[in-house]
């Protein structure tokens, strides 16, 4: 191979064509270019080809008169959509432009979808408002009056938000003597609805607050949406404590405002509405103190005059006291005499009862009963021994009589009992034949024999 020093050595077989991208590389680069060029877009069009597989994801297309684009909305995003879209809806979606590399499909990954024109949240708001209105939750007749002077104020809001700070600031300025209990809850996000319902229930179960502020500071419609949920509305309607809705700014209106017993434009305004102004109360107290002091002065002077008149009419009480003392001495002597007589009577009766008690003493009766029992026991033992002896003698006599007639006694005198092979007793020689096996029972033992001959004897002998 020759090289003149002018450049690199090149093989005549070396491939000089530009490097080709693989399909995967091209799709990956195209996806990266799309996602970096279109961070987030809003697209409006007609919904077409909507499908919901078992995975929970949504797949559909958006189209207009000329073109269409594929879209996907994954389960984590579409769970927040309250109204299920349907074929032919005119919608707006917010999402990211990307490329599905496996098929090379240009598509949008949707993060939010709403009807074109009026927003989905506003539609849901109006729909729930109509429903709760029909159920009577907005009726003025069911709203509870607020206490003119609350003894304890409950607040359902975030412990870190501006709302609790504004409420406490107003209450500290107007009437710091009223105690406040915070029932903390999330006021934004997916978990906020259940948290608010639980906090309202906790306030009822606690049972100390006689008015309840429910709210938060300002925000977007999405931020305030938990106060437009049906569960929160029904929890407020069912709350036994008078409620004040204080959500957002003055221009913000939520379902909670319609259901609550009172709507305040802001949390600060809610604190203003339910708390008395301590300066007004102090002024009223001073006025009432002045009027009370004047009234008491007049009453004391009038009573002093009456006392003077009554004192002049009052007789000397010492004479009445002496009469009462003499009467008390007389009653004391009568009482002493009655007590002594009563004690003498009781003493005589006690002596009589003591003598009767000695005669009827359980110890004496037990001793007599023990002697009686001992004598009965001795007689019973004697009778039992006599009875046993009589029965023993009778038994011995019966045994002797039984022995006399016993077959064993007969066998003992030389007699025997003969039985055939079936165990039947043989009484006549004619009952056996030559060759039969017989058994013979004697007094002591039994013998087996075979009949070799049979003699029936005199036929005139009775059987």
Image (cartoon, rainbow, N blue to C red):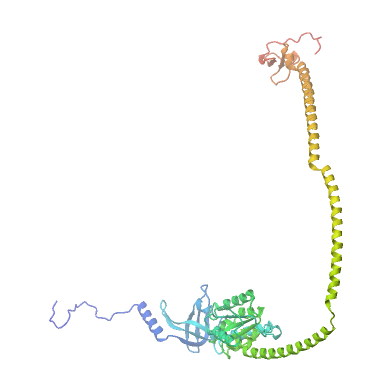
Q: Front-most of 200 and 164? A: 164
The residue that appears at 61% across and 75% down in the rendered structure is: 202
Q: Position of residue 129 (x, y in %)?
A: 63, 85
Compared with 388, 113 (above or below) is below
Direction from residue 260 to residue 300 in the image, left or right:
right
Q: Position of residue 248 (x, y in %)?
A: 56, 87
The residue that appears at 48% across and 82% down in the rendered structure is: 110
Image quadrant occupied by the C terminus: top right
Q: Quadrant of residue 31?
A: bottom left
Image quadrant occupied by the N terminus: bottom left
Q: Position of residue 20 (x, y in %)?
A: 31, 79
Q: Front-most of 354 and 22? A: 354
Q: Position of residue 369 (x, y in %)?
A: 80, 37
Is residue 88 visible to us here? Answer: no
Compared with 354, 238 (above or below) is below
Q: Front-most of 230 and 311? A: 311
Is residue 96 visible to us here? Answer: yes
The residue that appears at 51% across and 73% down in the rendered structure is: 55
Compared with 360, 216 (above or below) is below
Direction from residue 368 to residue 259 in the image, left or right:
left
Looking at this rendering, what residue extends furthest in the top direction? 458
- The image shows a total of numbered marks equal to 0
Direction from residue 386 to residue 12 in the image, left or right:
left
The residue that appears at 42% across and 82% down in the rendered structure is: 98
Q: Quadrant of residue 83?
A: bottom right
């Amino acid at each position: 191979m020759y090289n003149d020093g002018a450049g690199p050595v090149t093989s005549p077989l070396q491939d000089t064509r530009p490097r080709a991208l693989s399909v995967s590389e091209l799709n990956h680069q195209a996806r990266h270019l799309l996602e970096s060029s279109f961070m987030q877009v809003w697209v409006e069009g007609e919904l077409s080809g909507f499908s919901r597989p078992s995975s929970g994801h949504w797949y559909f297309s958006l189209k207009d008169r000329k073109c269409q684009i594929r879209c996907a909305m994954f389960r984590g995003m579409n769970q927040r959509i309250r109204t299920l879209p349907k074929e032919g809806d005119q919608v707006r979606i917010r999402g990211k432009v990307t490329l599905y590399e496996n098929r090379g499909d240009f598509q949008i990954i949707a993060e939010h979808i709403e009807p074109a024109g009026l927003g989905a949240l506003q539609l849901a708001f109006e729909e729930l408002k109509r429903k709760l209105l029909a159920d009577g939750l907005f009726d003025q007749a069911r709203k509870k009056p607020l206490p003119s002077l609350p003894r304890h104020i409950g607040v359902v809001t975030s412990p870190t938000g501006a709302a609790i700070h504004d409420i406490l600031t107003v209450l500290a300025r107007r009437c710091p003597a009223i105690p406040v209990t915070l029932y903390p809850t999330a006021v934004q996000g997916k978990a906020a609805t259940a948290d608010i319902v639980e906090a309202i229930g906790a306030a009822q179960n606690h049972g100390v607050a006689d008015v309840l502020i429910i709210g938060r500071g300002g925000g977007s419609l999405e931020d305030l949406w938990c106060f437009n949920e049906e569960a929160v509305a029904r929890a407020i309607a069912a709350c036994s404590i008078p409620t004040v809705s204080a959500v957002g700014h003055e221009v913000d209106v939520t379902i909670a405002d319609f259901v609550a017993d009172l709507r305040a434009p802001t949390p600060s305004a809610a604190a203003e509405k339910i708390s008395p102004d301590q300066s007004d109360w102090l002024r009223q107290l001073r006025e009432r103190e002045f009027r009370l002091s004047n009234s008491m002065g007049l009453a004391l002077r009038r009573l002093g005059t009456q006392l003077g008149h009554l004192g002049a009419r009052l007789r000397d009480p010492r004479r009445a006291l002496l009469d009462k003392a003499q009467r008390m001495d007389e009653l004391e002597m009568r009482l002493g005499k009655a007590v002594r007589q009563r004690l003498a009577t009781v003493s005589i009766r006690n002596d009589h009862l003591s003598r009767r008690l000695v005669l009827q003493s359980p110890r004496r009766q037990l001793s007599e009963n023990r002697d009686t029992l001992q004598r009965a026991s001795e007689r019973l033992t004697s009778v039992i021994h006599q009875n046993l002896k009589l029965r023993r003698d009778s038994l011995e006599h019966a045994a002797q009589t039984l022995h006399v007639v016993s077959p064993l006694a007969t066998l003992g005198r030389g007699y025997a009992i003969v039985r055939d092979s079936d165990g039947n007793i043989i009484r006549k020689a004619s009952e056996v034949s030559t060759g039969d096996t017989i058994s013979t029972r004697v007094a002591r033992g039994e013998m087996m024999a075979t009949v070799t001959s049979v003699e029936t004897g005199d036929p005139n002998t009775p059987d």
